[in-house]
Amino acid sequence: MADKQEVAKRDSTEVERTDRAPSSVMLPPADVFEDAEGITLQLDMPGVGKDRLNLQANKNTLLIEGNARIEMPQGMEALYADVRSTLYRRSFVLSDELETDKTEASLKDGVLTVRIPKRAEVRPRRIEVRAG
Amino acid sequence: MFGSLTNFDSLFEEFRRMEQQMDELFGRGTQPPAIRSVARGTFPPINVGAAADGIDVYLFAAGLDPKSIELNIQRNLLTVSGEREVPVNESATYYRQERFSGPFRRVIALPEDVDPDRVEAKYRDGILQITARRRESAKPRQITVE
């Protein structure tokens, strides 16, 4: 019963938040690749500086959020728009063999790079095939 | 001088909403697109806003070397070209490759009254912002009634 109340409460705050926030959130394009030591993600988030980035990695999920800073003169009128929001959000489900507490991130010219290393014991070993 | 971020969101959101309404009203395709318009999703995404004394063009192009951006204006036609190189890690396995890689070129038709001699551009956190001033004669003026 207590659980149910908790869920209901969370729902209502969610609704309140979407009311105030801009109605659309952008999904930043991402490259994801894996090598022997870990997984690397790269995301395009133009307009996002270090102070406007929120990165959370827990055991299961990696959450990436950013808020673009755009300088705009007063009294501007829109003539054309491909982009209609300043919020970016994307999340990924992680897997057990990743060492999320050793996640490293860097941001340069609006490109976010996140590196998550694999646990040493799960890094691939090369198995030698012997002739004969 | 500069408005808040919420303004940006609501301004361009409103514009897109209006555009969608027009599409619904007239049916997609009956409203012919501008001759230099491009398909949605072309890199880099662009927003254009107009104020009383100038036009601001925003190119959402992360990861560029500002020195490699070529910017030209001929009358009111602004051309932006460059190349974004996304190095590929040959020894890695790729699960997603969504980011644009390669040369790009976009032509933006600005309003006729921009002054091609007064255009400024700056690149910050992956956004190229180009500010073009309007010609003095084209600016709105208060006319006194005598």
Image (spheres, grey):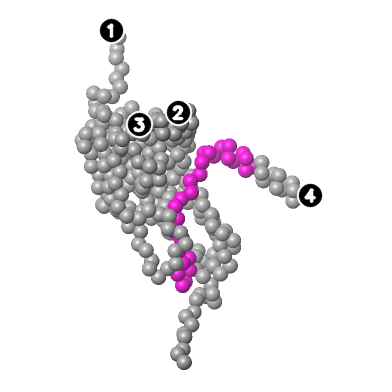
Q: Is residue B86 above or below residue B48?
A: below
Q: Report the residue marked by disc 1.
A: B146
Specify which label sits upstream in the sequence, 3 or 2.
2
Mark 1 chain = B
Q: Nearer the viewer, mark 4 or mark 1?
A: 4
Q: Is residue B1 above or below residue B89?
A: above
What residue lies at 23% left-to-right and 42% top-to-bottom? B72
Question: Separation of disc 1 and disc 2 at Cα?
Answer: 47 Å
Q: Is residue A20 left or right of residue B120?
A: right
Residue A12 visible at all: yes
Residue B26, disc: 2
Question: Separation of disc 3 and disc 2 at Cα?
Answer: 26 Å
Q: Amino acid at mark 2?
A: Phe
Mark 3 and mark 2 on one chain: yes
Residues shaded magenta: A13-42
Q: Report the residue marked by disc 3.
A: B50
Most extreme residue toward the bottom is A132
Mark 4 and mark 2 on one chain: no
**Labels 3 and 2 touching (C-beta < 8 A):** no
What residue lies at 74% left-to-right and 46% top-to-bottom? A5
Question: On the image, which quarter does residue B76 sit in?
Answer: top left
